[in-house]
Image (cartoon, grey):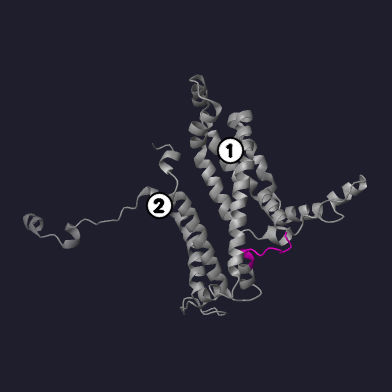
């Protein structure tokens, strides 16, 4: 009987081992972040893109497809392209000015505080704990007629302060003021990556100050500088509070048009189409600039 039992054929379930799909540990650990990105970033983005092709002044998302919203934007009688031009021009000027302002500050922080420069630069982030609108209204009270500056000068017997409010210049000033930390912090970290021993060795070998900056300091610090520039450009292109509060809407930014489409006009498809175009333009410009740079040389890979 035992021989017969041993000779009995096994069933398929008994003979075939169970196969389980092994999920890599890295994927398991990253799954909360992936889920967060899918729900918090990808899903809203896909919704905006879907609304861009919905019927104008409707909420038929995922149920209709039309290019009428984009046709409205590209209509020759529509002046929304001016808003795009103003936003991109202000963003570009903000990046250029902040690069010129933040680099000497970051360089000084690294030379004076050394390895503590990153911690010291965090002090420049403290204004972010105060609402941006509150800080901008503070500048409005400072520059407005009979305000802090104007009243102080008149008290001293001088002429009143300059009328700078509600001009493109004060809008640019507000953007430089607001986005300084976003340029300064990555730039400080980038300059902190430059080994001082390498600079000292180059100086001992007879390299001049300009050559050291061009051949050593700037290339090694370029990752942080690029991150600061891209981050500042993306944020500045979507700025709206500076033009509203300091500029008095003398200049209409594209984000203001998007806000109007979503609120007062209740035309979500048109606002979504404007948002999609803004994303495409910003992404295209960023990729174009990155394609023109030798990233392998900048990042020190060759």
Q: Position of residue 133 (x, y in %)?
A: 72, 57
Under circle 1, the secondary element is helix
How many other residues sit within 10 Å of disc 2, few (<14), some (14-19) or many (≥20)? Answer: few
The answer to whether one can see residue 40 in this image is no
Instruction: Please give the name of the residue rendered at 85% of the width and 53% of the height, measured from the top-left corner.
Output: 147
**Quadrant, the N terminus:** bottom left
Instruction: Please give the name of the residue rendered at 37% of the width and 48% of the height, measured from the top-left corner.
Output: 25
The residue range painted magenta reads 247-256
Q: Position of residue 213 (x, y in %)?
A: 53, 32
In the rendered structure, the answer to whether residue 50 lies left or right of residue 146 reads left
User: What separation in Å lies between label 1 and label 2 (alpha carbons)?
Assistant: 34 Å
Q: Quadrant of residue 278?
A: bottom right
Q: Position of residue 107 (x, y in %)?
A: 60, 34
Relative height, residue 175 to residue 51 (above, below): above
Instruction: Please give the name of the residue rendered at 10% of the width and 60% of the height, measured from the top-left corner.
Output: 9
Which residue was labeled with disc 2?
28
**Quadrant, the C terminus:** top left
Magenta part, dominant SS: loop
In this view of the protein, which residue sits in the foreground, 33 or 78?
78
Which residue was labeled with disc 1?
188
In this view of the protein, which residue sits in the foreground, 162 or 171?
162
In this view of the protein, which residue sits in the foreground, 164 or 115?
164
């Amino acid at each position: 009987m035992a021989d017969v039992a041993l000779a009995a054929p096994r069933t398929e379930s008994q003979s075939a081992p169970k196969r389980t799909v092994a999920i890599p540990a890295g994927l398991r650990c990253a799954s909360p972040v992936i889920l967060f990105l899918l729900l918090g970033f990808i899903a809203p983005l896909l919704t905006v893109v879907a609304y861009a092709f919905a019927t104008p002044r409707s909420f038929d998302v995922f149920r209709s497809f039309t290019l009428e919203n984009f046709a409205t934007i590209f209509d020759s009688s529509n002046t929304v392209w001016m808003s795009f031009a103003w936003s991109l021009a202000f963003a570009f000027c903000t990046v250029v000015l902040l690069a010129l302002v933040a680099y000497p500050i970051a360089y000084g922080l690294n030379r004076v505080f050394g390895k503590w420069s990153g911690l010291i630069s965090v002090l420049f982030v403290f204004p972010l704990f105060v609402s941006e609108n509150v800080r901008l209204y503070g500048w409005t009270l400072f520059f407005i007629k009979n305000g802090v500056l104007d009243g102080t000068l008149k008290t001293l017997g001088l002429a009143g302060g300059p009328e700078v409010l509600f001009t493109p210049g004060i809008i640019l000033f507000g953007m430089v003021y607001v986005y300084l930390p976003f340029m300064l912090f990555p730039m400080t970290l980038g300059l902190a990556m430059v080994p001082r021993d390498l600079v000292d060795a180059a100086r001992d070998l007879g390299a001049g100050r300009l050559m050291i900056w061009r051949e050593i300091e700037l290339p090694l610090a370029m990752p942080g500088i690029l991150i600061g520039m891209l981050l500042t450009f993306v944020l500045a292109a979507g700025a709206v509070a500076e033009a509203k509060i300091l500029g008095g809407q003398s200049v209409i930014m594209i984000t203001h048009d998007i806000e109007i489409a979503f609120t007062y006009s209740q035309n979500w498809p048109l606002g979504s189409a404007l948002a999609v175009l803004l994303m495409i333009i910003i992404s295209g410009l960023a990729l174009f600039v990155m394609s023109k740079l030798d990233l392998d040389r900048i990042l020190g890979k060759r």
